Amino acid sequence: MKKIVSYILLLTVSFFYTAIDIAAYSAINPVQEAADNALNSDDVFKGRAEINDKLEKENKELFTGEIDQLDTKDVIKMTVSQVLTSGITEEGDEFFAEITSEVEGDKGVILPAGTIAHGSVREIQESKRFGRDAWIEVNFDYLITPDGREIPIEGKMSTKMNPVVGTSKMIAKSAGYTAAGGVVGGFLALNLFGLPAAVASQGYTLAGGAALGGAVGLGMALYKKGKDVLISPGDEIRVKVTKELDLPVFKNEALKQEEFTCDGLNVKITNINFEEDPFGELNTITIALVITNLTDKYFTGFDISLVNDLNASFYPSVFGDTTIMFSKIKPGDRTAGRISFSVDNIKRKHWLVFYDRMQRKQIAKLSIDNAYKEIQAKKKKSKKKKKA
């Protein structure tokens, strides 16, 4: 009797779930059928054709049509987006960096400034006794260009030194010797003898004599720990390309930064210098200008600022050239001079901005990058003419 009841229950449950499956299929099937019809329709091919046409148009606007090669001899200058330091950063940690200087091939620019690089920490070593500095080695596996392309690459950067050279360097300094020779490089914000792009530091020469108490200095050097490695946002690293890669060449026009002008306000940038402030920091941009004011507006140096690509504003610095800073530019005036700005990172993109002093609205925005390229191009042409 129990077996009969069990069979009846089993058949009832099976019939119930079968009915649900049929109902569900009936409900979903029209949707699936509509999707299948859509996939088989001509609209899909029209959409694909439109997308392809759009991509082809964008490519024509961006690229010359030529291909150039990113060589293994090429070094890419970058700045990291976060702090990398021994004691905190671990092997395997991922981070992003930004290319700060355009990478050019024989035919033109193949990697524009602003390209983002994805990296990961391959190996990191903390500082040790005997004055051995910490070091870090990172790998880069792909780039994201400003136009949205993702490019696989193979690149690396290391601050690692030859351990013997590292120890000798510290002993020499503490014992009163003068260390000379070798190749000095690395990050701009650090005073380490670490070389980027895995370039080994060799050829140190010891000169001079031992100072009084040299034995004590030698003992202290053997006990003293080396320096921790620290890479901060804004510090420049140089990444060595380890595998060749073919890339399209950008048009010069495609690399220009956006800008806008004000009718009647004619601003000509004649020169740009990157200078140190009184404290020795390379953070000052000095711009030579010729301003012709044919508007009905009144300007002073305080109606001018530099704005970077992070939308941070920097006003004229008293530590640089103040010719235009204290000038009064009235309607009909023509003024020539220089103006200086202290910025947080001279490697970022900057725009010279003029404001309506009553409404504090931007009325003109001129790209420093565009002007700098034009100035350098003119200098190159001038040199070629002189040689000819």
Image (cartoon, rainbow, N blue to C red):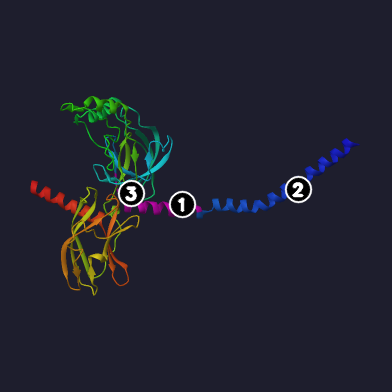
Q: Is residue 381 left or right of residue 92?
A: left
Q: Is residue 288 above or below residue 276?
A: below
Point out residue 69 in the picture as x, y percentages from the top left corner: 29, 39
Which label was assigned to residue 319?
Answer: none
Residue bearing the label numbered 3? 114
Q: Is residue 203 above or below residue 278?
A: above
Q: Main secondary structure of the magenta part?
A: helix
Mark 2, other Cα within 10 Å: few <14 / some 14–19 / many ≥20? few
Please name the amino acid that badge 1 sits on. Answer: Arg
Nearer the camera: disc 1 or disc 2: 2
User: Do we see residue 388 in this rendering?
Assistant: no
Please name the amino acid that badge 3 sits on. Answer: Gly
Is there a contact, CB below 8 Å, between mark 3 and mark 1? no
Given residues 319 and 266, the one toward you in this image is 319
Where, by quadrant of the figure, is residue 139 drawn? top left
* Segment colored magenta: 44-66
Question: Distance between the Cα atoms at labels 1 and 2?
Answer: 41 Å
Point out residue 237 in the picture as x, y percentages from the top left corner: 30, 40
Q: Residue at x 84, y 38 (%)?
A: 7
Question: Distance between the Cα atoms at labels 3 and 2?
Answer: 60 Å
Residue bearing the label numbered 2? 19
Mark 1, other Cα within 10 Å: few <14 / some 14–19 / many ≥20? few
Point out residue 242 in the picture as x, y percentages from the top left corner: 32, 33
